[in-house]
Image (cartoon, rainbow, N blue to C red):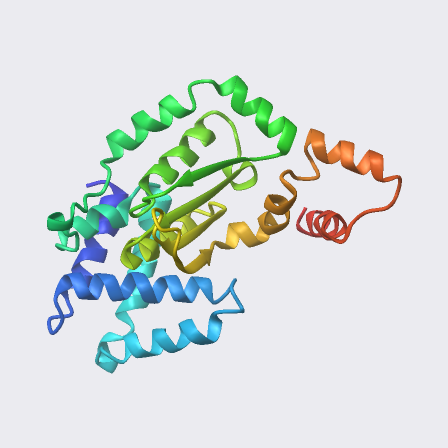
Amino acid sequence: MSPAKQHTDNLAKLIHSVGYHPPREVFQDFCEMAAVAVSNAVDVLHRETREAQYMRLIQRYKPKDQHLFRAMLDELQQALEKDPSDILGRLFMEVGGSNSRSGQFFTPESISQVLTDLTLADTGHVQSLIEERGFITLSEPSCGAGAMVIAFALRLRELGINYQQHLHATLVDIDCRAVHMAYLQLSLLHIPAVVVHGDTLTLKQHSSWYTLAHAMGLFGIKLRRGFSLDSARGRELIGNQSGQEDADSLHERRMTMAIG
């Protein structure tokens, strides 16, 4: 048995150990509570509202079982360290969480890898975009648990590109359960991303979830500007400013030096 599968099996056992709720509900509650716990370290604006939702969920469980959710998160984190892949998507299907009647199926990882290889076939173009702008962007309009973005990030890593610095993903899904799963996995894999609970067709948005890598990488500033300061366009901007930097540029330079 692989180390990753051992942790995945442990996670499944913990979910099934709560006998008074169906496994799919325990799984969904775990994903939402873990997503809230991660988000609250980043998103001050929505912290109070999300913390209240966390408390409503945890109170559905007996005091003797509440510690299990911490153990579930530990198992997930260790599984992702051993095998960075769509672990939650697979588990979601196993516990009966998907809705086949509404056409909800999660993309198999083999398909994700093929699509990623096709997208990144021209590695020279990708490298030139990173040199020019400092990062590339990826959009996933029906993200599921984030399998496509995870595969894309791992392929960048295989190409010698640090996805934590040079990739930003925007994901959307109409199902809040998918949003929580994708957000949790991308957060634990330190992928800069915004996961939106919304409808791609109507453009209606209910909530946005920012990963820690998004915040630490100052991608709010970089996306507004369209490039990072350590890119060709950034160096040109600094050269043209003749010592006069805008507030965003100054903040990015200071934070980059502090982190570095």
On the picture, is 9 further left or further right than 113?
Answer: left
Q: Residue at x 41, y 54 (%)?
A: 196
Count of numbered labels shown in the rendering: 0
Q: Position of residue 4 (x, y in %)?
A: 27, 44
Q: Residue at x 18, y 65 (%)?
A: 25
Q: Position of residue 130 (x, y in %)?
A: 59, 29
Q: Is 67 drawn above or below residue 213 in the view shown?
A: below
Q: Residue at x 45, y 63 (%)?
A: 39
Q: Residue furthest right?
A: 242
Q: Is 100 drawn above or below residue 206 in the view shown?
A: above
Q: Is 75 drawn above or below residue 226 in the view shown?
A: below
Q: Position of residue 194 (x, y in %)?
A: 46, 51
Q: Position of residue 232 (x, y in %)?
A: 70, 29
Viewer-closest of 74 and 218:
218
Q: Residue at x 68, y 46 (%)?
A: 260
Quarter containing the N terminus? top left
